[in-house]
Amino acid sequence: MPESEHKGNGRPRYENRDLAARARRKPESARLSALRSLCLLDTSPESCFDTITRMAAFQMHAESASLDFVDETRVWAKSIWGGKLREFPRKDSFAERIIDEGKPVVVLDTQSEDRPRGFYRPDKILDLRSFVGVPVSAADGHIVGALCVGSSQPASQIDSDEIALLESLSALVTDQLELRRLRLSTDEPSSRPTETEGAYQTAEAILPLEMDSAWPLAEDLRYALDQQQFVLYYQPEIELATGRIVGLEALIRWRHPRRGMLSPQVFIPQAEENGLILPIGDWGLGQACRQLQLWKKDRPWLDGLRVCVNLSARQFTRQGLADHVESLLLQNDLRGHHLGLEMTESSLIPSIGTAVSVLTSLQKLGVSLHMDDFGTGYSSLSHLHRFPFDVLKIDRSFVKRMSKGTQPLQIVKTIIELARVLGMDVVAEGIETPEQCALLQKMGCRFGQGYLFAPPLPAEEIDELLRSPETRIDHSITIPA
Ligand code: C2E
Ligand code: MG
Ligand code: MG
């Protein structure tokens, strides 16, 4: 593949700027802070950026142009000329490469298999062959994104003047970002100071202690992510007949410096609404895989153990989920059967076509697919057979009511029978009493989780439980919630 890094005619004019850019490059955390202080990831696109991408495409005689900002895991395209707006995984994207290198990158006349991934994949429609991208900086000099163009014309070289032109358009983006920052600080005098004005305030100073319905805002969640305040607890899933641990459900908590340990019900709905569920979910998925790899190390008896992660609708419908999961498995030396993904019916129903294709790609990886909270929400039995689920999780509200009358008991029986016919395993959630456990076993339910066996526990306590191949959680040993 002929590829050059800004080869121009003669000595490239921007070489000194390149050195300056390298010197300016700061650690990833500084870049992310600069990006976050601009609060532009989960806001609507601004039309001023469209003028810049359009100019970039015209001036460079390119079919498409894109202005991308890059956080830990995603590329947030804020303006695209020649394609649809979207955000996509950061890994192996063209924007990631520009951020990592901190200087202009030119890819000339690539073969299709060598094309940069990402770049919102216009190559599928436009068959792009050559790409040029330059970093975009905030006013304080931190690189926060990339301005890229793609062309279907194979190029033998890119003129240094063309790079300079793209860099001046990138400087226009910097001006727009600075205007935006100034506007934000005048509009919201109480909002968090930017990196240039000093370090973030402590969470205590920013957050009101009273729970108001709008709390937490996107920036509170982003700050918590940045400060590593999220933590995963793990609740064992048990084979009821033997007490053997077959899985661990990862359940997120927020260790808030003032408010204490917060339940996901307090912040997941807001995170779903404002889009922060994407980086939070990516963190959770990665953390659960890393943790399982640690537990499994030197413990061959844990090969059959899987860790299950809850996915929200937004994570699920995003492009590239299966690729992301596959790369996490590879990075952590795990195989598909080590990971379970839990989704509720309601997260699948709005887009059944997408759901079927995403689930099918995940199934190909060997990942175990769990329908969570079954029996609540849509309960559209007619859809169930279309989804390749491996496990049905009976919602705990049914388990709770089971001993209170024949109708709830009948519902649980029907769910277990339905799963049997469809070849799925059943996990009953929220088992709290030995009676519930006995009733479920009698009806043919093999697996369960609940306070009767163990509440969600921190990773260190699970580590203790997993130490011996003989460990069984017998329901005669009640662990308090
Ligand atoms: P879920 O996936 O249905 O998780 C089961 C919930 O039941 C957990 O609540 C667990 O602590 C609770 N539970 C387990 N055993 C018992 C029991 O015997 N009795 C009772 N009363 N409750 C029991 P938790 O941890 O508060 O999580 C609530 C929901 O938040 C989860 O429901 C899941 O939908 C969501 N969630 C948790 N972690 C994540 C995450 O990382 N990502 C996403 N998208 N959602 C998450
Ligand atoms: Mg769950
Ligand atoms: Mg559930």
Image (cartoon, rainbow, N blue to C red):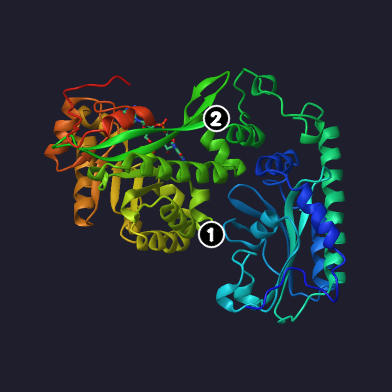
Q: Secondary structure at mark 1?
A: loop
Q: How crowded is the residue under tag 1: few (<14 C-alpha within 10 Å), some, or many (20+)?
A: some
Image height of 50 relative to 281, above or below: below
Front-lying residue, 213 or 84: 84
What residue is rendered at 32% in x and 32% in y?
A: 463
Q: Is mark 1 within 8 Å of ligand 1?
A: no
Between 163 and 349, which is closer to the camera in this rendering? 163
Q: Which residue is mark 1?
A: 319
Looking at the image, is mark 2 or mark 1 earlier in the sequence?
2
- Residue appearing at x 57%, y 44% in the figure: 279
Q: Is residue 175 visible?
A: yes
Quadrant for residue 374, please give it: top left
Report the side of 317 relative to 15 (left or right): left
Q: Looking at the image, is mark 2 or mark 1 nearer the viewer?
A: 2
Residue type (three-letter) at the residue carrying disc 1:
Gln
Q: Say if disc 2 is inside 8 Å of ligand 1.
A: no
Viewer-proximal residue among 208 and 159: 159
Horizontal placement of 404 versus 380: left or right? left
Residue 463 left/right relative to 239 = right
Q: Give the quadrant of ligand 1.
A: top left
Q: Residue at x 26, y 47 (%)?
A: 303
Q: Secondary structure at mark 2?
A: loop
225 sits to left or right of 386: right
Q: Is residue 450 above or below residue 355?
A: above
| Quarter of the image that includes the N terminus | bottom right
Q: Is residue 51 something one can see in this rendering?
A: no
Residue receiving disc 2: 229
Q: Residue at x 75, y 58 (%)?
A: 103
Q: Nearer the viewer, residue 458 or 341?
A: 458
Three-letter amino acid code of the residue under disc 2: Gln
